Amino acid sequence: MTDAPVVAVLDYGSGNVHSAVKALAEAGADARLTSDRGLLQDAAGLVVPGVGAFRAVMEALHASRGDEAIERRLAGGLPVLGICVGMQVLFGRGVERGVDTEGMGQWPGVVTELDAPVLPHMGWNTVRAGAGSVLFDGIEHERFYFVHSFAAQHWTLEVLKPFREPVVTWSDYGAPFLAAVENGPLSATQFHPEKSGAAGIRLLANWIQALPRG
């Protein structure tokens, strides 16, 4: 697709990146797995996948300077989408089994273990999409695929007018947790769109269609 927007998938050593690239292509993007600084900045969108421990992902981002690429894009108002632990590290801190790790601090809050009888939370679950969501347009009542034991469970960001309130989407497993956030150029999902079948492809397509063109 020659007019497909270029979406860079940040290559910093995280697993499961190829399924994300494939899903983005199916959703209408010219998806490229890359660590090239120029492409990370110039692409229409940047996707930050993430699996594993919060600290390991932060260490890999620091080592590859991927955190700098994310911050540079956001400073310029350029779209970024975090997935799973790629969402979690956007918060201020992560606490996993007593290990307290500083996150990127794009949003205030702490990622903590879910209060549920069985972990990980693995499988399909519904969400409560926030009003005016772009990501969940047309798929508000679909199920999405989660694999995680930790999440942000509180939303404390205060936005003053004229800035627009973020769109916050929740899910439940033992207790409510953040399933997705849409905050200006920065969006993220705790679930895996690339593993969520047609609904996940539609969500990615919704994000892609909202990207700035040429």
Image (cartoon, rainbow, N blue to C red):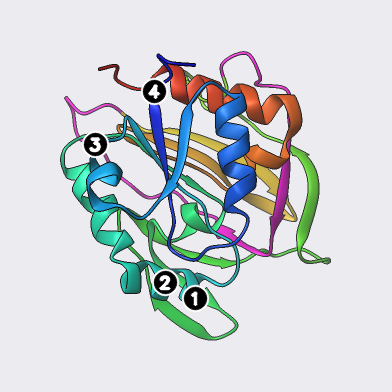
Q: In the picture, residue 109 is in which quadrant? A: bottom left
Judge by depth and name the residue closer to the eye, 190 or 211.
Answer: 211
Per the model, the C-alpha gap separating discs 1 and 2 is 6 Å
Q: Residue 60 carries which label?
A: 2
Residue at the spot of label 4:
5
Chief secondary structure of the magenta span? loop
Q: Where is residue 33 in the image (x, y as percent from the top left)?
A: 46, 47
Q: Which residue is labeled 3 in the image?
A: 42
In magenta, the rendered stretch is 137-164
Task: Give the amino acid at mark 2.
Answer: Ala
Q: Which residue is drawn at 52% across and 25% down?
A: 135
Q: In this image, 26 relative to 161: left or right?
A: right
Task: Give the alpha-carbon distance from disc 1 to disc 3, as whole Å.
Answer: 27 Å
Neighbours of disc 1 within 10 Å: few (<14), some (14-19), many (20+): some
Q: Which amino acid does label 3 sit on?
A: Asp
Judged left or right of residue 112, residue 194 is right
Residue, disc 1: 56
Task: Say which label, 3 or 4, has the lower sequence index.
Answer: 4
Q: In which quarter of the image is residue 110?
A: bottom left
Crowding at mark 2 (Cα within 10 Å: few <14, some 14-19, many 20+): some
